[in-house]
Image (cartoon, rainbow, N blue to C red):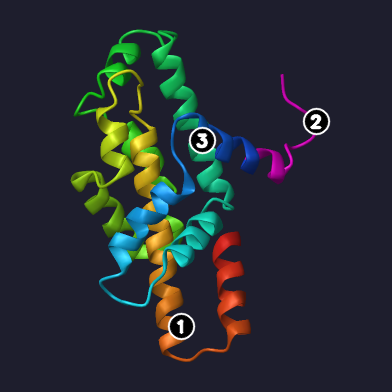
Amino acid sequence: MKYAEPVHCHIVEKAARDLLKERGVEIIDIAEIVHKMQVQYTDTLTLEECIESVDRVLEKREIQHAILVGVELDKLAEQGRLSEPLQSIVAMDEGLFGVDETIALGSVFGYGSIAVTTFGFLDKEKTGIIKELDTKGNQINTFLDDLICSIAANASSRLAHRIRDRQEKLREEEIIRRDIEERIG
């Protein structure tokens, strides 16, 4: 059955943010990864700037949709409600199963090549909360750990561009306009 009206963006964003919290992920956990990735390029970077960047990334529909789909699949796998052999593949986080990375990677493309390469690095290195999610024994996070890589990579890329904009002394209005366009695109 198809719904007549689209779901309002605020409802979708709230649901995505709520799912992150429900699964034990706080915005600051992601911001700490972003800070670690970007502080080497600007020693004045604050954790607050990283939190703000993560928040802006979470405003993008593509990210929200990926979170909704990925976490739902993780939860269904925990409940044993996926069909075999998918149930076993997701539950064991099968190494050759790339659908989890594909969904997360799909939401990285909006932030350019920096986000793509950062995603690959984070997926390999399993930094911070990503490692915790990847090794949590009582919870299936096959999709979620990759989604956090995606969010952190996007926020890192977004910050890298904001830092360069400020180094080039762009007017704050222009930086804001670029950011708004980036979130829509």
Circle 1 sits in a helix, a strand or a loop, which is it?
A: helix
Q: How far apart are marks 2 and 1 (CA)?
A: 42 Å
Q: Which residue is drawn at 70% across and 39% down?
A: 11
Circle 3 sits in a helix, a strand or a loop, which is it?
A: helix
* Prevailing secondary structure of the magenta residues: loop
Asked where in the image residue 14 lies, by quadrant, the reply is top right
* Amino acid type assigned to the residue bearing label 2 in the image: Ala
Q: Which residue is drawn at 56% across and 40% down?
A: 17
Q: In this view, does 39 lie to the left or right of 95?
A: right
Q: Residue at x 46, y 85 (%)?
A: 166
* Amino acid type assigned to the residue bearing label 3 in the image: Lys
**Quadrant in which the C terminus is drawn:** bottom right
Task: Point out which mark residue 140 bears.
Answer: none
Q: Which is more foreground, mark 3 or mark 1?
A: 3
Circle 2 sits in a helix, a strand or a loop, which is it?
A: loop
Q: Distance between the residues labelled 3 and 1?
A: 32 Å
Any magenta on residue 163?
no
Q: Mark 3 points at which residue?
A: 21
Q: Name the residue under label 1.
A: 165
Q: Mark 2 points at which residue?
A: 4
